[in-house]
Image (cartoon, rainbow, N blue to C red):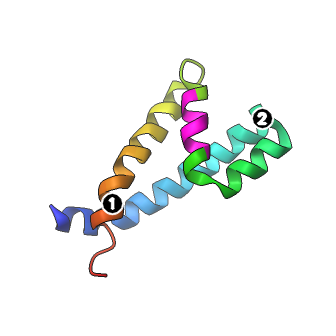
């Protein structure tokens, strides 16, 4: 199982960056300048907040953000390989 997370860590990192950029775009359009700046520097809290805020409005984003937040746990534990 560890080998799967190690081999897919790069893919997860790229999709997590894309999801965070999407989060920042949503924050700037929905929350204004201050919301966008805060979201830019607080990725976990921003994605958690905007995920709940977007349920019902932008379900595609909400489910992708939820998947990334859930997958961050095993990828954080096993994904980087040897420490």
Q: Is residue 14 magenta?
A: no
Q: Position of residue 44 (x, y in %)?
A: 54, 50
Callout 1 secondary element: helix
Query: From which residue to which does the magenta span run?
Result: 46-52
Between discs 1 and 2, the one toward the N terminus: 2
Report the Cα–Cα distance between label 1 and label 2: 30 Å
Taking the image as shown, residue 73 lies to the left or right of residue 14, namely left
Quick one: 63 or 11, which is closer to the camera? 63
Query: Which residue does the image show at 49% across and 54% down from the upper left?
Result: 16
Query: Which residue does the image show at 31% across and 82% down from the upper left?
Result: 83
Query: Which residue does the image show at 63% across and 51% down from the upper left?
Result: 21
Q: Pointer 1: residues within 10 angstroms few (<14), some, or many (20+)?
A: many
Taking the image as shown, residue 1 lies to the left or right of residue 15, namely left
- Circle on res. 75: 1
Q: Position of residue 48 (x, y in %)?
A: 54, 40
Total numbered labels: 2
Q: Is residue 1 above or below residue 81?
A: above
- Circle on res. 31: 2
């Amino acid at each position: 199982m560890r080998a799967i997370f190690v081999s897919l860590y790069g893919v997860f990192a790229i999709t997590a960056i894309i999801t965070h950029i999407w989060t920042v775009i949503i924050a700037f359009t929905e929350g204004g300048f201050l919301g966008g700046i805060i979201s830019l520097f607080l990725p976990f809290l921003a994605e958690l907040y905007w995920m709940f805020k977007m349920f019902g409005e932008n379900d595609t984003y909400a489910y992708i953000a939820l998947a990334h937040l859930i997958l961050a746990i095993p990828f954080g534990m096993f994904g980087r390989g040897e420490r």
